[in-house]
Image: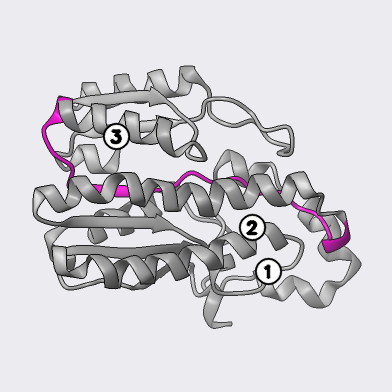
Amino acid sequence: MRLAEEGADIIAVDICRDYGTVSYSLATEADLDDTVKAVEALDRRIVAATADVRDAAALKSVVDDGVAELGRLDIVCANAGICTVQTWDEVTPAIWQDTLDTNLTGVWNTMVVSAPHLIAAGGGSIICTSSTAGIKGLPYLAPYVAAKHGVVGIARTMANELASHNIRVNTVHPTGVSTPMADGLGGLEALIGRDPNLGPIYMNTLPIESLDAREISNAVLFLASDESRYVTGLEFTVDAGNTIR
């Protein structure tokens, strides 16, 4: 929505179904329909489709169709992600695989199917959503931490490989954000209670517990814009000082 407000046309993709390994509800087809209506209310065009970022072929089809309809691709936001809370010895193979496949391989797939269109357009910007968990070893989030650290690595690699095409690749690292995902992580407080020494790892320096999603969208907007034309390979923290503690 933030990008559409500034004049962007949108290709919107979501799986629109829940995961058996995730305790909170994910977005629905009704949510995607609402997004279409909201973008169109801003007098922008939008191509919306249901697809799984883990399925590279399906994702490629959606992006190709969207570019064919809208004309070109300039900005890519790799934002799909899930999170679960548990101790290391409660991480099941299914939890590990779902998280890595979505949060890391899904980001990779998004970049790979989009890069040819950015090259054809003469350049562009890729913004990957990481996390403070992509910088710090947040306890009880092991699969999520592994994936978000991995996102930084592949973003840096792509920043180097795509630079000759005038394509920039950066990562955004939010602290806690008020979303359904955050609401679904209620078990975290109880786990931290077992070892209060771990609680400060989650504390922000600024006196705010969680951010509004729009604060992160504003960072994405900057990285998508010409104002950041020489910014690439950056870990852009929007974390209220979490990672400097």
Distance CA(mark 1)–CA(mark 3): 34 Å
Please tell me whether the stretch drawn in magenta is mainly helix, strand or loop: loop
Task: Specify which label sits upstream in the sequence, 2 or 1.
Answer: 1
As helix, strand or loop, the secondary structure at mark 3 comes to: helix
Assess whether mark 1 and mark 2 are in contact (beta carbons under 8 angstroms). Answer: yes
Task: Report if residue 149 is visible in the image.
Answer: yes
* Quadrant location of the N terminus in the rendered image: top left
Residue tagged by mark 3?
63
Assess whether mark 3 and mark 1 are in contact (beta carbons under 8 angstroms). Answer: no
Point 33% across, 56% down: residue = 127
| Quadrant housing residue 169 | bottom left
As helix, strand or loop, the secondary structure at mark 1 comes to: loop
Q: Amino acid at mark 1?
A: Leu
Task: Specify which label sits upstream in the sequence, 1 or 3.
Answer: 3
Q: Is residue 78 magenta?
A: yes
Q: Amino acid at mark 3?
A: Val
Q: Which mark is residue 138?
A: 1
Assess whether mark 3 and mark 2 are in contact (beta carbons under 8 angstroms). Answer: no
Distance CA(mark 2)–CA(mark 1): 9 Å
Q: Is residue 188 magenta?
A: no
Distance CA(mark 2)–CA(mark 3): 26 Å
As helix, strand or loop, the secondary structure at mark 2 comes to: helix
From which residue to which does the magenta span run? 69-89
Query: Relative to 79, does residue 207 appear above or below in the rendering?
Result: below
Point 45% across, 31% down: residue = 14
| Quadrant housing residue 43 | top left
Tell me if mark 2 has few (under 14), some (14-19) or many (20+) residues whose alpha carbon lies within 10 angstroms of its own: many
